[in-house]
Every structure is written in C-alpha cells, then in structure tokens.
Image (cartoon, grey):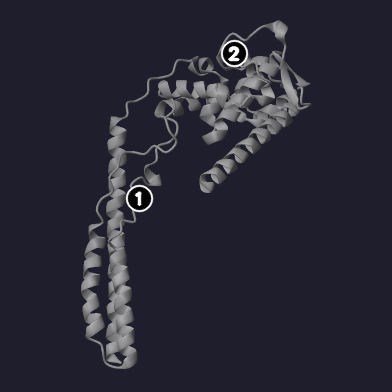
Amino acid sequence: MIKVVVLIGCVLVYVGLLCIAWWLDGRVYRKAISAAWDRHMATVPEPADLAPDAVVRMGPAALGVLIVEGRWSAWRAYEAVVAGLLAKGSVRPADNHRGRPTLVWEWEKGPPEGGVEKAVWDQHCDLAELHPNRVVHPVVQRLVSEGVLREGETLHVPFRPPVPVWAKIAGVLGLALTWPVAHLFPDGIYLSKGSILTAGALILLSLSMFININEEQPTALRLPRLSERGEQVVKQASVQFAHLDPAVRDESQRYEPDEVAFAVALFGDRALACFSEDLVERLAEWQAYWGALEERARREEYLRRWSG
C-alpha cells in the first residue's frame, strides 16, 4: 500500500513540475512577444499628417478597400464606384443580352475623367460581367506603394521564439524518473504492471516537453492589414464623412450625387439601400454569380489536383 502511495505521489509531483515548467516558459514567451513588438514599434516612423483633402483625393474605391477586410474589400470598392456612376447618371438600369439585370452606359455623356470609373469604361464590358478585381487591383497596388496598405495578408512582426528551457529540464527529469518508477516497485503482478504503464506514460509526457508548442508566427504578432498611415486615413474619413452615416439621417435627407460613392464606401449596404434598393439587389445577384464561379473553379482545381 505504501508503494502505491509513493508511486501515485511521484506521478503527481511530476505532473506539477510539468505545469510549472509550462507556466514559466509561457511567461518567458509572452515577454519575448512584448519585446518583439517594442522593437518593431521603435522602427516605425510616425506617419505625416494628412492634407485636409487627402481622403477625397484618394477616392471612394480606395476607402472601400481600406474599410473592409479580406476578399470582400474589392466588392465594397466596386459597389461604391457603381453607385456613384448611377447617382451621376453615367449609367442606367437595363437588361443585358442574357436577360440579366445590369447597368448600361449613357454613351452620350462620354467617358469618365479618370480613376476606377475610367477603368470600368475602358473594359468595354457589361458591368454585371466585370469582376471587381480587374479594376480594383490597381487601387490596391497604389495603396501599397503609398504605404497605406501592407502587402500580403499574413504579415508578422519579426520574431524568433525563445527556447523552452524549463520544459526541456522537466522532460529530462521525467526521463530520469521513469527508471525508478519501473524498477523500484516490481512487487506483485498488478503493482508491477502499474509501474511499467506509469513509466511509459512518463516517457510520453517527458518527450512531449521537448516539442516547442509556441508557434514561430503567433497570432499575437500578426500585423494589421492597414499601416499606421492607413489607420490615419480611415479615422479622418470617418470624421469627414460622419454626416453620410444613414443612422444620423432621416428619409428627407437625400444623398447628393457626389456623396453617394463615399457613403457606400464607408457604410456599405446601409447607405446603398437609402440610395437605391434596386441596386442592392443587382449587386447581390452579381456577387452571387461570381461567388458561384469561384467556388466551381476551386472545386475543379481540387479534383484536378487529386486526380493526378
């Protein structure tokens, strides 16, 4: 009975040592993360103050890219541009040759002066058949070149994880403990089997302590998609166009044609529905159409890859 108590006590003591080792290594790891952030922030220059008209000159498409994260940012930018074109009378609702609802150009008005609107015109393509990336990608490249966006989607602060010293020490102690556990308590058939099984469990736990559970690029070190200057742009745009928020407007306050694109860029479908519910439905149909094509392409690529 005494040997059983000693055996259980050894195991409990070792499990306690493992927990302490993990806690100590975790504290060292958190300090290393904090130090990595401090080094990174020390190398980041303060962004220059934006000019009063910088946000307006940047355009609604750029704001749409900055406001929305991920793959849907191109759609927000495209929605803002299309809504602006409709508000200014450059396009009008119609059906294309397939019978799908679309918007067609008012050719007598001539091409837009520039920007994404001109890029859409130059495609000579049905607006319902034009993928946003074709005209929004140059905007993303410009934002990256201007230091507003960070290039890539999974950038991290440079970081080398510290060696888990305490975990390795605990692993060595555990391996050293397996011999007395397996050999010093051999009396009795059940006790002997229990000792051997316990020693095997200790070996597995000890070996696991040599695996660094900390990732080299943890989520805590992931850089935001917007640079410091990009965050400055978003803050200034939020203040400058706060009056376009549908939540602070009533039905009698209609958007001016020049306001529609910026309102949609910042507030999305909420502003778009105040301007044109029909356009909300059209854009939703276009997005569903392109989403289905992308899903089909991914499925075909998956089948092609696994079929050899």
Label 2: which secondary element? helix
In percent of width and height, residue 302 lies at 54, 44
Identify the residue at horizontal 27%, vertical 90% (top origin): 2
Residue 266 appearing in the image = no
- The residue identified by callout 2 is 118
27 over 298 or under it: above or below: below
- The residue identified by callout 1 is 215
Residue 168 appearing in the image = yes
Work out whether mark 1 precedes mark 2 in sequence or the reverse, and give the earlier one: 2
Q: Quadrant of residue 179?
A: bottom left
The furthest residue to the front = 308
Q: Give the quadrant of the N terminus.
A: bottom left
158 over 90 or under it: above or below: below
| In front of the other: 170 or 47 | 170
Q: Is residue 149 left or right of residue 164?
A: right
Q: Quadrant of residue 300?
A: top right
41 over 117 or under it: above or below: below
Label 1: which secondary element? loop
Identify the residue at horizontal 39%, vertical 41% (top origin): 222
Identify the residue at horizontal 37%, vertical 39% (top origin): 156
**Label 2 neighbourhood size at 10 Å, few (<14), some (14-19), many (20+)?**
few
